[in-house]
């Protein structure tokens, strides 16, 4: 039968308090779980944003004409729409209730990833996506190394919708300490056949695995450890996970 | 510190032999691992296809004019192109080396999901996607119940590319015993705020989690068990994971 060492374990970091501005996430995590070398620490973007103080009272936003126009189409508060525009490089689609944009960081998602749930319970107070998520992941990784002596990878995850398929899934929007793409071309398969182009988005798969445990409602698990999963070490950047528009054959 | 019961475990089913036509996957899996109630059994589509005999010698295919034309553009063997066309409802994009299609089952993927790697080592012998993957997942689930008495969910997984983001990830192309989408609207968040529209593709996240362990080269792990992951029971169908084209605001 299987040994525990063959397995991957997805371990919750329990009893994380509600996070506020300037909280030290690395310290909070390291006090609650014994890290091991090669763990992947997945942290939900919501708490990273809060620790960065990226929580905004939309009542203080002054919406422009475009925001008012999009507000009429979508039924969204014009101040929230203005905030979505401020966080975006380009508006890609406007639906009856949804605004799909490309964020300044290059993520394509609804409402520029701005959260209302799990921010503070007041619908006018929203959480933006974290600022410079790769640098933030790196900062947390180095701090964890200092506190625990362990070499880990850090992923900042978000839950995003996607084309073609219903439902949102966990994806990596910040990465440090691992290569987010695992290029397997040149390796052999079970029959000795050489793989031509296999490229796996390991960091996105890890974010999805973590999301199974984190949940989206009142689970209160904003950080999980993935232990025993193989990955390629390296500084890495979430930008490697973004396709260039011109080369994106899957855009239809 | 955390108890094992808080965790999700991704457990490989070890020592699965090379699968051939008419092999009984449920029997092979149940002989190699002790299943528990509520396990999710994730099986890679490659072995399901092989057990169904969906392995084709492209040398026997007679390519038509369209296949020959697309072959010139992509450098792909015209017989393989003909097979891709035969498996597809619509060709969506033709690139320098890639053909993106909608399969007859509604999956949008490169080369209609036809595999060359891990089929038999001969480049002219390819594996098609499984036939009726939901029914096949159901058949395996009921057979596992008969053999072990355990109530599990079964996912047939594939590794697919996607728009906007580089690298392929595991997705669910066949589902039985679970609702592939977990609709969380109406639930409360940590602050008591009621979620408006949160819908998570749990089956796709589980397929991605399994993919971390399965790998794409010579790992030889075509089936894994996900234990301890919450999901909603129900017959379920992978079709729920496919967005209607007209309502797909993420298509850009």
Image (cartoon, coloured by chain):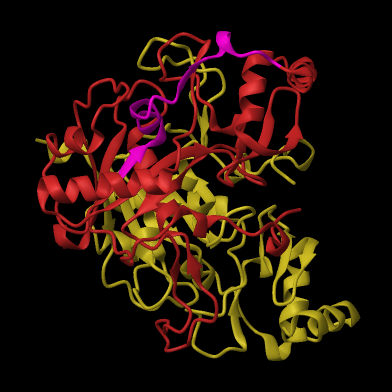
Chain colours: A red, B yellow
Q: Position of residue B228 (x, y in %)?
A: 27, 40
Q: Where are the magenta residues, as a range?
A: A42-63
From the viewer's perspective, is B63 left or right of A138? right
Give B251 or A113, whichever is nearer the viewer.
A113
Give A201 or B65, whichever is nearer the viewer.
A201
Number of labels in the image equals 0
Queried whether the magenta region covers residue A60, the answer comes back as yes
Queried whether the magenta region covers residue B206, the answer comes back as no
- Residue B153, visible in the rendered structure: no
The residue positioned 26% from the left and 56% from the top of the image is B11
Examine the image and state in which quarter residue A230 appears. Answer: bottom left
Give A53 or B104, whichever is nearer the viewer.
A53
The residue positioned 48% from the left and 72% from the top of the image is B22
The residue positioned 21% from the left and 59% from the top of the image is A38
From the viewer's perspective, is A108 left or right of A184? right
Give A55 or B139, whichever is nearer the viewer.
A55
Q: Position of residue A32 (x, y in %)?
A: 13, 34
From the viewer's perspective, is A189 left or right of A25? right
The residue positioned 42% from the left and 28% from the top of the image is A216
Outermost residue on the right side: it is B65
Query: Is A70 situated above or below A34?
Result: above
Query: Is A223 situated above or below B209?
Result: above
Examine the image and state in which quarter residue B96 appears. Answer: bottom right
Q: Position of residue B191 (x, y in %)?
A: 37, 12
Q: For the N terminus of chain A, which image quadrant?
A: bottom left
- Residue A250, visible in the rendered structure: yes
Q: Position of residue A43 (x, y in %)?
A: 33, 39
């Amino acid at each position: 039968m299987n040994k525990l060492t063959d397995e991957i374990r997805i371990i919750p970091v329990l009893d994380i308090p509600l996070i506020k501005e300037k909280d030290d996430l690395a310290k909070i995590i390291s006090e609650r779980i014994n890290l091991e070398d090669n763990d992947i620490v997945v942290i939900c973007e919501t708490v990273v944003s809060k620790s960065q103080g990226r929580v905004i009272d939309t009542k203080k936003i002054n919406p422009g004409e475009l925001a008012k126009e999009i507000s009429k189409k979508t039924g969204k508060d014009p101040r929230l729409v203005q905030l979505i525009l401020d966080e975006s490089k380009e508006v890609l689609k406007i639906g009856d209730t949804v605004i799909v944009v490309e964020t300044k960081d290059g993520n394509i998602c609804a409402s520029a990833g701005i959260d209302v749930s799990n921010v503070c319970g007041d619908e006018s107070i929203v959480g933006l996506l974290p600022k410079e998520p790769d640098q933030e992941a790196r900062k947390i990784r180095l701090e964890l190394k200092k506190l625990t002596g362990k070499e880990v990878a850090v992923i900042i995850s978000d839950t995003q919708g996607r084309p073609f398929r219903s439902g949102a899934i966990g994806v990596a929007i910040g990465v440090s300490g691992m290569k987010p793409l695992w290029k397997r071309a040149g390796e052999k398969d079970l029959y000795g056949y050489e793989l031509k182009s296999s490229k796996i988005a390991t960091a996105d798969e890890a974010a999805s695995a973590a999301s199974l445990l984190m949940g989206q409602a009142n689970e209160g698990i904003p950080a999980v450890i993935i232990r025993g999963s193989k990955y390629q070490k390296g500084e890495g950047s979430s930008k490697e996970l973004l396709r260039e528009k011109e080369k994106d054959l899957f855009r239809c």
